[in-house]
Amino acid sequence: MTSPCLLRAATLAGAACLLAAAGCDRVPDVVRIGVAQPLSNGLAPLGQDMVNGARMAVDEINAADGVNLRGRHVRLALVLADDKGSADAGDAAAHKLVDEDVEVAIADLNSGVSIHAAPIYAAADIPQLAISTKPEFTRLGLPTTLRLVASDDLQSKALASYAVQLPGAVRYAVVDDGTPYGKGLADASAKVIANQGKTVDVRESLDDRTVDFDKLVARLAASGTDVVVTTLSDFQVEALMAQLAKAGLTGMTIVGGDTIKTDRLLRKAIPIKAVYATSSIVEPAEFPGGKVFLEKFRAKYKAEPVYGAHYAYDAVYMVADALTRNGVVDKKALLKTLKEFDGNCPITNSMRFGADGEQRYGAVGVYQLHGAAWEPLMRSDRW
């Protein structure tokens, strides 16, 4: 016969277990999604574009009764933080999102900021979805670093491979802007050119403010360069083209990175043979769901997307899908699912993280400057 005391103890223990389990499986009223992007410096338009994409997805999901967690419909909420495009501000933004108890962070735009802030997110078990491209981001040994697009490893191959196959191209120059991003991408591109049996006759590293290219133009003329592969910015390439034309080098072709694929060079005369840009940020219109996305974005914001809004939009939908499948709000469970499934991505239609957090379906596009537009030529994930 069991004593009353033992029965009471067993009952209390069982109740405690039930309460603990209920606490662990508690469904919150709101799931917070953090977005850390540059919102107050020169990159603010790009950062705000990411915010706009994420907000549009959140608004759509909430309008459709939110995220279904075991039959309960939970709303999503955005928590914004300005990383100002700097490491210190990025760390502060990460701490803010951790303090706000976000389940995931769409952070950051700049590779240096993403890399510097990554340990903060990792310590809090927060999956960090970054649109930054520096390969080192996913090589930190942290489980929470997830890349939304192709890395610079693929873009360097695209830059070099596209330049090498241009008809009539024999002599090459590789010019970077001296930044860690630009120099790393250019160094890798130079190696790819060499590996394909071509010679880089001019290898120049400048800085990200240079607009006087007299010495470079003289070297290009002396070497008979046909193609300049460069990571200079848009305003620098604008100046370089003018100086090439002034020196009579109008037969030159420039193949640049995504730093020239901006509106600055549009609707301006191109005084050289051709200008191409490569980018890991594939245009929305190139995806199956792009037309509908663009229509909705224009209606909501009365403007065109300018950078990666569609990737942020898809990231939110993918997170919502993972939460629904899990049925619980748990950061570790969320991270596990994100690395194991092809989630709902209405625009790109294919986003999958490898075990190392690298984007397995990332592609790099090539675009040619034609008057009022950057015309898409091709994209590949197998450069």
Image: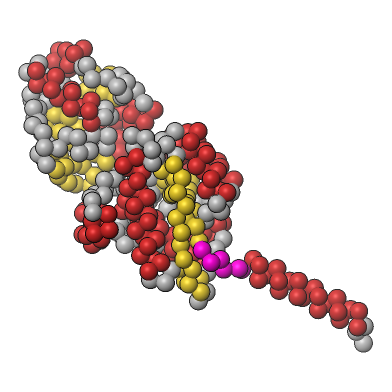
Question: Could you tell me residue 61's position as x and y percent?
Answer: 39, 66
Residue nearer the viewer, 349 or 199? 349
Kindly indicate the quadrant of the structure image that contains residue 210: top left
How many numbered discs? Answer: 0
User: Predominant secondary structure in magenta?
Assistant: loop
Horizontal relation, residue 312 to residue 172: left or right: right
Q: Nearer the viewer, residue 142 or 27?
A: 27
Asked if the stretch drawn in magenta spans residue 196, the answer is no
From what the image shows, is residue 149 above or below residue 64?
A: above
* Image position, residue 246 (x, y; %): 9, 18
Q: Quadrant of the N terminus?
A: bottom right
Q: Please name the residue shown 16% across and 42% down the image.
A: 374
**Relative to residue 23, is residue 300 depicted above or below?**
above
Q: Residue at x 51, y 74 (%)?
A: 72
Residue range (magenta):
25-30
Q: Is residue 154 visible?
A: no
Above or below residue 298? Residue 2 is below
Q: Nearer the viewer, residue 278 or 127?
A: 127
Query: Residue at left 18%, top 27%?
Result: 238
